[in-house]
Amino acid sequence: MSIISEKELNYWLEHVRVYANNGKVADYIPALANQQPEISAAAFYSFDSECNSAGQVEYTFTIQSISKVLTLALALIQHGESAVFSRVGKEPSSDPFYSIRKLELEEPGIPLNPMINAGALAVTNMIRGRTSDEMVNEMLELVRRLCDDQSITYDEDVAKSEFETAFLNRSLAYFMKQNGIITGSVEELLDVYTKQCAIQMNVKQLARIAAVFANDGRDPNTNNPIIPATVARVCKTFMVTCGMYDFSGTFAINVGIPAKSGVSGAIIGIVKNEGGLAIFGPALDDQGNSVVGIHLLEKLAQEKQWSIF
Ligand code: DON
């Protein structure tokens, strides 16, 4: 039986929905500025394949930076740890996710970790494929297995809107290309990156992805491996140290579970030995995390004593 009932999830979501008034929808990607701040949804996918959900559960959104965990998993599967970590570091940054300054300050000049934009661009650059379409397909194939849903794809309008306005990400990529961290065409890299960020799903599908990580990389229904346990462990560790950007330390104290957010307002949370939680609420705080999501995670983690610390 799931550790969290639909009734409980409804109760707590109803309780924290009002916090949406304290946040602001991301608008630096024009297509995201249209999101309705009052929409909220949550789902918990447990190992017995039960998925309890609350709010606007069929509403679809783009996963944005949550994709960084998934490209990291794919790059680790395809190339192994030593190759991946020769081009991206393992340390938290304490800077905003889009920051460029430490790229120049830190030696040996590789991005600090795969959860900031510079690091994610370096990781995406490693995905196998002769063309950007092939790279996107590799990514979609993994996400479809994680969701157990072959219909998963990306939102073309959101991808295009980000591609047309991603000047800062282009700067990061060109800086890294100059330093030999990124190879090939920056425009093709941006094409893949903006499409991976625009992968679209609802909160139940996202909760299944979280459940795979909670189950050490195995399918929560069949127990068949999708991601090797060693790769899932590395991804979950990054979620703890860098998953909520420059809020990761406070989040580790207040909530204490591996989690990853995206500027669309989505968050995944990994509940050890139990299952995966996904929340959507597009109003963001100053660090770019969903305000409703953070409050819901704080309430649930306290109530259920989820902290791993
Ligand atoms: O690179 C960007 O700006 C976005 N596509 C993803 C950023 C993101 O979701 C950061 N999250 N908090």
Image: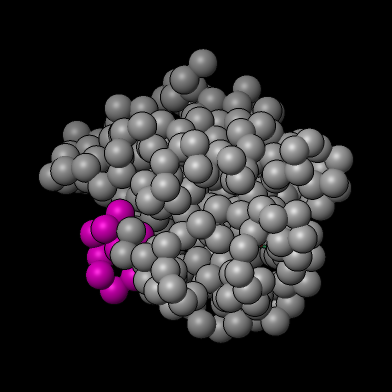
Q: Position of residue 158 (x, y in %)?
A: 58, 77
Query: What is the span of residues highlighted in magenta in the rendered image?
Result: 143-152
**195 inside magenta stretch:** no
Q: Position of residue 165 (x, y in %)?
A: 74, 77
Q: In the displayed structure, would residue 171 be above or below residue 72?
A: below
Q: Quadrant of ligand 1?
A: bottom right
For this view, does 65 lie left or right of residue 52?
right
| Of residues 38 and 94, the one drawn nearer to the viewer in this rendering | 94
| Of residues 276 and 297, the one drawn nearer to the viewer in this rendering | 276
Scheme of colours in the image: one colour
Specify whether residue 285 is in view. no
**147 inside magenta stretch:** yes
Q: Residue at x 70, y 82 (%)?
A: 164
For this view, does 274 lie left or right of residue 233?
left
Quadrant location, the N terminus: top left
What is the residue that sits farthest to the top in this orientation? Answer: 309
Q: Residue at x 44, y 24 (%)?
A: 306
Q: Position of residue 252 (x, y in %)?
A: 60, 26
Q: Residue at x 82, y 43 (%)?
A: 102
